Amino acid sequence: MYQVAAINHALDDAIQARIDNKTKPLGAFGELEALALQLGRIQLGSATDELVIRRPVMLVFAADHGIAAAGVSIAPSEVTTQMVLNFVAGGAAINVFCRQTGFELEVIDCGILSPLGIPEVTEQRLGAGTGPIHKRAAMTLGAVHQGFAMARTLVKRHIDAGSNLLALGEMGIGNTSSAAAVMAALTGLPVSECVGRGTGIDAATLKRKCLLIEQALLLHHCELTEPLSILACLGGFEIVQMTGAMLAAAEFGVPVLVDGFIASTAALAAVRLAPGVRDYLIFAHESEERGHKLLLEAMSAKPLLRLGLRLGEGSGAALALPLVQAAANFYNQMASFGEAGVDKVVEPATQEVF
C-alpha cells in the first residue's frame, strides 16, 4: 500500500569514514554523527556529495476531540480554535521558534469545531471534531484514508516547491487522550504507562482520563487489530494526517523532524504501516509526557533534545532544526586531518595488566 523505498546502506562505510576523518576525536560529536549518517543515507549519491537542508517547512495540524467534553484537559475544546487564531496572528511559541530557526510555517485545520474560512489556515477537514472514543469510534475508516490522501497532497506540494525537510506539530484539546489510547492499542502497554498529565491536569482528572481510555479500549477491543482500524477507533484527525504525512514524506525520500508525544504516536502508527518509514524519521526531543519515553524506545529512537518540554505545536521540532543543520554543515565544511595538516588522533589500544 505504501511504497517506501529501502534506505541506501551502500555508502555507509564511506560516509562514516568521512565523518571519522574530520579534525576531532573519533565519535566526539556523538548523536550529531549518527544524524549526519542518517541524512547521508537519505540524500547522498556518493560520500563526496554535500548534505543540503533546503526550505524546511513546519506543518502544524489542528483538530478537536470528542473525549474533551468528558473533562480530560484543563481547557475546553474552544481553546483549539483560539490557539489556531494565535498561530495566524503570529503570537504562539511555534511562531516565535519558526521565525528564530528559519522554518516556513503552515497551519492545517484537520477538523476543529468550526471552520475558520480564512486563507491563513489550510482546510483539510475530516469533520467537526472526532467522536468521543469512549462512546463510539473517533471516525470511519474512510476518513482515515481521506486524511492520508490529503496529507500526501500537502507533503507533495511542499516537496515540489523545493523543501527537503519537513517537521510536524499539532494542536488539539484532548489529543493526549487520543494519542495515549492509540499508543496503548499499538504497543499493548498498560494504559497507566501511556497516559500522562497533558497540559497539567490534577490527580482526579488524570484518574478520569485513564478510566475513559480504558473504557475506549474495551469498547473497541475487537476492532483494534491493525493500525488503520486503531486510528479509526481511537485516533484524532490531526494524528491521522500526521501519520499520512510521514508515510508520504518517506515515499518521496524526505526526512521528517518528529515533535513530541502526539507526533510520536503518529510516527509509531506510520512505522507499523510501513516499517521503512523509520529510517526517515528524526526525533527532535523527549517530552515530559509520561508515555513519550516508551514510545521512543518502541522505535529505537534517540531524541536530539531533552528539555522537559510539554507544549506540542511542533515547538521541540523547531528547536531541533539548528542541530540538523549543524550535522549537515560539519559533514560538508569541517576539514579533514589531511586538509588541515593536523596529525590524526589515535586512541591508544587498551592494554591488559597482568
Image (cartoon, rainbow, N blue to C red):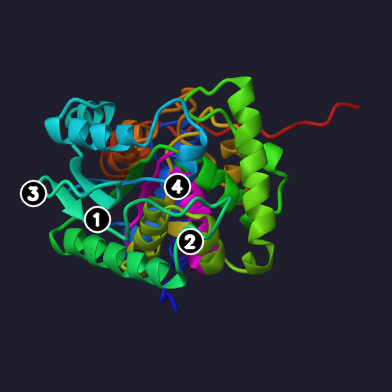
**Which residue is tagged 2?**
270
Q: Residues within 10 Å of mark 4 (few under 14, many from 20)?
A: many
State whether the magenta stretch is mostly helix, strand or loop: helix
**Which label belongs to residue 164?**
1
| Distance of label 2 from label 1 (alpha carbons) | 19 Å
Residue 292 sits in quarter: top right
Looking at the image, residue 321 lies above or below residue 142? above
Badge nearest the viewer, 4 or 1? 4
Residue 87 sits in quarter: top left
Q: Residue at x 34, y 59 (%)?
A: 245
- Find out whether the residues at labels 3 and 4 contact each other: C-beta distance under 8 Å: no
- Find out whether the residues at labels 1 and 3 contact each other: C-beta distance under 8 Å: no
In the foreground, 252 or 13: 252
Badge nearest the viewer, 3 or 2? 3
Query: What amino acid is labelled 1 in the image?
Result: Asn
**Which residue is tagged 4?**
66
Image check: 54 left or right of 188? left
Is residue 219 in view?
yes
| Distance of label 4 from label 2 (alpha carbons) | 23 Å
| Range covered by the magenta-colored residues | 254-277
In the foreground, 269 or 208: 208
| Distance of label 3 from label 4 (alpha carbons) | 26 Å
- Magenta-drawn stretch contains 261: yes
Badge nearest the viewer, 3 or 4? 4
**Which residue is tagged 3?**
119
